[in-house]
Amino acid sequence: EKTRHALISERRKIDALTSDQAAVDKELAKVQREIDAIMASEGALGARHLAARERLEGTEAQRQTESVAALRRAKHDLQREVVAGEREKRELEVAISGQCEDVEKLDASAKGLLGKIDVVSAQRARLQAQLDQHQESCTRDEEELEQLGNKLLGLKSTAFNSFAASGIVQVKHFG
């Protein structure tokens, strides 16, 4: 009987342990479901995080690609502007060189013209002096001619009076 009581007691312990085990298994299943739910949530969260990171990386890569493309376009534009600027600089240098040559030619022409003006001015002054001398000479000649004319009139008058007095010429008086 003792063995039987011991067996019953063991059986009750086993039943209690089995009941406890069932409760632990039930609790374990509940905890496992919570862990699975957390893991699923964590997995979904990880997937969302991964998707967000991939979108961010994609956006960053696209932004960098666009930035590189914009920088390349800007570099190309700047290179074109530099080439155009250099071409314009060369054209200006050629134009300036041509203008310098023109200025030198004009300067030489101006110096030549100034020389000619000096020659013409000297000729003009010489001719003006000759004209002044000629006018003075003409004025003297006119005065001399006038004096000679007066003398001639005086001589004519004297000769006429002499001839009239000597009777060579007869003067008729009309009256």
Image: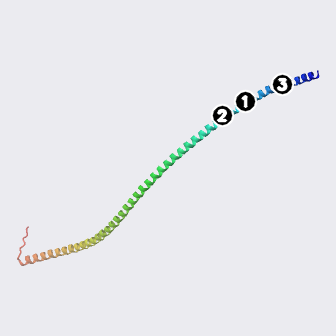
**Residue closest to the far right:** 2
- Identify the element where label 3 is drawn: helix
Whether residue 124 is situated above or below residue 36 in the rendered picture: below
Residue 45: percent from the left, percent from the top? 68, 33
Viewer-nearest residue: 121 or 109: 109
**Pointers 2 and 1 in contact (CB under 8 A)?**
no
Residue 91: percent from the left, percent from the top? 41, 55
Q: Tell me the amino acid under the disc marked 1.
A: Asp
Q: Earlier in the sequence, mark 3 or mark 2?
A: 3
The CA span between labels 2 and 1 is 16 Å
**Pointers 1 and 3 in contact (CB under 8 A)?**
no
Numbered circle sitting on residue 36: 1
* Residue occupied by mark 2: 47
* Residue occupied by mark 3: 18
- Identify the element where label 1 is drawn: helix
Viewer-nearest residue: 105 or 163: 105
Q: Is residue 2 left or right of residue 117?
A: right
Q: Tell me the amino acid under the disc marked 3.
A: Thr
- Give the quarter of the image for residue 172: bottom left
Task: Say which residue appears at 59% left-offset and 39% top-offset.
Answer: 58
Task: Say which residue appears at 88% left-offset and 23% top-offset.
Answer: 11
Q: Earlier in the sequence, mark 1 or mark 3?
A: 3
Q: Quadrant of the N terminus?
A: top right
The CA span between labels 3 and 2 is 41 Å
Q: Residues within 10 Å of mark 2 (few under 14, many from 20)?
A: few
Q: Tell me the amino acid under the disc marked 2.
A: Ala
The CA span between labels 1 and 3 is 25 Å
